[in-house]
Amino acid sequence: MRTVFYHLVLVGTFIYGSIFHIWYLIFNRGEKRYRYVCRVAKNWGKNLIWGSGSKVNVIYKNGSEEEVRKIRENNEAVILISNHQSNVDIPALLGYLPLNFSFIAKKEMKKWPAIGRWMRSFDCIFLDRKNARQGMKDMKDAISKIKKGHSYVIFPEGSRSKDGTIGEFKKGSFKLATDTNARILPITIVGTYEVQSRKSLKITPNKNIKIIVDRPVELKNMSREEKKDVHNVVNKIIKDNYKEGKNI
C-alpha cells in the first residue's frame, strides 16, 4: 500500500504542479521564475518524503550550519557534492536543505515532455557527454550560471548505488568546481537506499533518513596538484560521514 500511495503522490503532485504552476513558467523569465520554481520544488520534495512515510534529519558538522547560513545570505554559488543512494535522494535534498540549488542532468532529459520544461525553468544544466564540442559549450553555460549565483548538486558516482555502498567519485564531475573555484559543500545521504533501492519500485518507510552536511572545501587556496586530487578528498569526507551516520 505504501508503494502505491507514494507513486500516487508522485503523479498527483506533478499533475497539480503542471496545471496550477505552468502558467507562471510561461509568463515569467529569469531570476523571478527560477526562485519561484525553487519554492515549488521544496514543497514537492517534502510531499514525496511524506508520501514515502519517512522522516529526514539534517545534521551539520564542523561549523557547516553557520557556513550554510552565510551561503544563503550572500547568495553564494556552491557545488554540492553528494553520494547517490536512491531516487528518493532528490526529494530529500530539495525538501530539507535550506538552500536554493539545481541539478546537473544528461542532455536527453531536456526534451522529456513536461518534465523537461520544469527542469529548464529550474535552470538545470544539461551535459552532452558524447559530443566533446557540445560538452564544452555546456560547461561554458554552466560556468555562467555559477557566476550568476546558482548552486548545483552533482552526484559524482555517476549513478545510484547498486548495493547501498558509496563508490569512487569521477574526477570529471569536479570540473565545474575547479574551473570556477566555487566552494564544494560535501553532502552525505544515509537511509534513502532503505526506502527505495535501484532494483525496485517498492517503497519502505524509514524514519531515520539523514542528510549530513560538512564544512565547505575551499579551492581558491589549493595548488594545481591539490585540485587534481580533490575528488578523493571529498570522497573520503562523505564515506567517513556515511559510516558515522549509519551508527547514529
Image: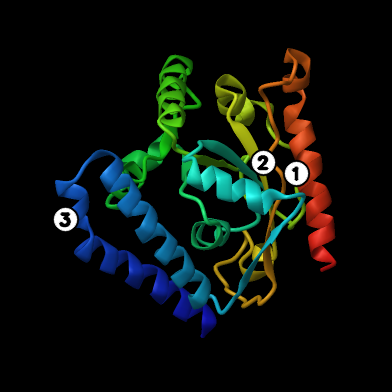
What amino acid is at disc 2?
A: Glu
Under circle 1, the secondary element is loop
Answer whether labels 2 and 1 touch (C-beta < 8 Å). yes
Q: Is residue 124 left or right of residue 16?
A: right
Under circle 2, the secondary element is loop
What amino acid is at disc 1?
A: Gly
Which percent across, then down, holds residue 131?
A: 45, 20
Please, which colouring scheme is shown?
Answer: rainbow
Q: Which residue does the image show at 22% across and 41% down from the upper left? A: 29
Q: In the rendered image, which residue does mark 1 sit on? A: 167
Q: Is residue 244 left or right of residue 205?
A: right
Q: Quadrant of the C terminus?
A: bottom right
Question: In the picture, residue 220 is in which quadrant?
Answer: top right
Q: Nearer the viewer, residue 196 or 246?
A: 246
Q: Which residue does the image show at 55% across and 37% down from the upper left? A: 78
Residue 17 - label: none
Answer whether labels 2 and 3 touch (C-beta < 8 Å). no
- Labels 2 and 3: the sequence-earlier one: 3
Question: In the picture, residue 97 is in which quadrant?
Answer: bottom right
Q: In the rendered image, which residue does mark 2 sit on? A: 157
Q: Is residue 114 above or below residue 47?
A: above
Q: CA distance from mark 2 to mark 3?
A: 36 Å
Q: Which residue does the image show at 74% across and 57% down from the upper left? A: 163
Q: Nearer the viewer, residue 241 or 15?
A: 241
> From this viewpoint, is residue 196 visible?
yes
Q: In the rendered image, which residue does mark 3 sit on? A: 23
